[in-house]
Image (cartoon, helix red, strand yellow):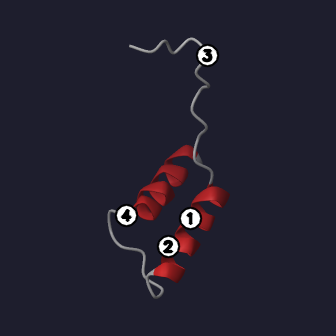
Amino acid sequence: MASKANAKPPTPMTPQVAQRIQSSTAKTNGGNVPKGSFAARATSSAAKNNK
């Protein structure tokens, strides 16, 4: 198994990054962001991290 000694800590999802992901997904899907998609999960995560 690979060592995680040099692994970087995870970067929290920010509202700005989630907005870019959601915008891109909406453009691809005719204005819709599918429920359960990565964009939806990113937005949820950003909201929780922003508290």
User: Which residue is identified by label 2?
Assistant: 25
29 vs 2: above or below: below
Q: Which badge, 3 or 4, comes first in the chain's sequence?
A: 3
Residue positioned 48% across, 86% down in the render: 31
Q: In the rendering, which numbered label is found on residue 21? A: 1
Residue located farthest toward the front when viewing the structure as drawn? 1
User: Which residue is identified by label 4?
Assistant: 37
38 vs 10: above or below: below
9 vs 35: above or below: above
- In space, the residues marked 1 and 3 are separated at their CA atoms by 28 Å
Residue positioned 57% across, 32% down in the render: 10
Q: Are marks 2 and 1 in contact (CB under 8 Å)?
A: yes
Q: Position of residue 37 (x, y in %)?
A: 37, 63
Q: Position of residue 35 (x, y in %)?
A: 33, 69
The amino acid pointed to by label 4 is Ser
Residue 25: tell me if it is visible.
yes
Q: In the rendering, which numbered label is found on residue 41? A: none
- In space, the residues marked 3 and 4 are separated at their CA atoms by 30 Å
Q: Nearer the viewer, mark 1 or mark 3?
A: 3
Please tell me how crowded label 2 is: few (under 14), some (14-19), or many (20+) other residues with Cα within 10 Å: some
- Dot 2: element: helix
Residue positioned 50% across, 48% down in the render: 48
Q: Which badge, 1 or 3, comes first in the chain's sequence?
A: 3
User: Which residue is identified by label 3?
Assistant: 6
